[in-house]
Image: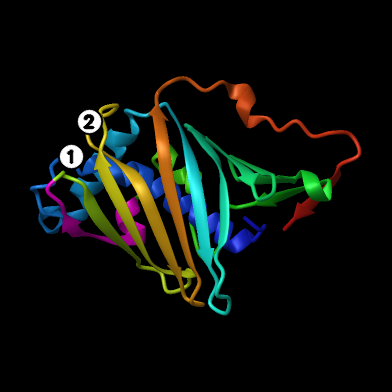
Amino acid sequence: MLYQKGFTVTFFRITLSLFILSLWVTSPRESAAKEDPASVAKKIQAAYDKITDLQTDFVQTVRFQDFDTPYVSKGKLFLKKGKMRWDYQEPSRQQIVVEGETATFYIPEHKQVIKSRIGGQSDSHLPLQLLSGTSRLDQDFQISIEEERPDKSLSLRLTPKSKETQVSKVLASVAPSPQVEGLVIQKVTLFEENGNVSTFSFEGMQINKGIGEDLFVLKIPKGTEVIDSP
């Protein structure tokens, strides 16, 4: 994924939201329309309390408005309470670590590290506020169930309430998981106002298997340029 601060921050928030959101839909037979925002928020927090860490493979496909050929990236995602790491492995290497209000982007090919604050931006709240319980999903999105399938998997639709965000809507597919009581995300598609569409597919998800703190410390070679981005 190319470094784009605004898009990256927005996606971090939505990704965390969806991983947690997918766990509160524990009964596909119950319509989301029957859930008031306060009840939904409580179920999201309850689901979050079940997860100490998560890791999964991902494939990212970006279809740009003016290009016929999509841009495809592959890698691994690691989540731990208060922290997140993306390891892009194909077609080029890039490592992204988010902790607190700081996102660190390491691009080996460019021999650069870009450090950026992600708090206080107009298009999103700090994504880790959601994990710490200081941000509520129902305040940021209108949530609805688009489709219920025989295998108990669901299609979810999130519509941002803010008019300032770059994302017009989000569609997500969630399915039952034997690892937790509830559903986990399989695919999420972000539709941007500029016409770009980004799809993230997740496979081989492992929940609460144990992730060390050292994984969220990037090993930066000497001589790497460090850039502090506003």
The dot on residue 26 is 1
Q: Can residue 199 be seen at all in this image of the molecule? A: yes
The dot on residue 165 is none
* Circle 1 residues within 10 Å: few <14, some 14–19, many ≥20: some
Residue 97: x percent and y percent?
62, 40
| C-beta proximity under 8 Å, tags 1 and 2 | yes
* Quarter occupied by the N terminus: bottom right
First in sequence, mark 1 or 2: give its number.
1
The amino acid beneath tag 2 is Glu
Instruction: For marks 1 and 2, give the CA distance.
Output: 7 Å
User: Residue 88, located in which quarter of the rendered image?
Assistant: top right
Kindly state the secondary structure of the residue where label 2 is placed: loop
- Position of 160 compared to 71: left or right? left
Residue 146 belongs to the span the image colors magenta = yes
Which range is magenta? 137-150
Against 165, residue 13 (above or below) is: above
Residue 39: x percent and y percent?
18, 47
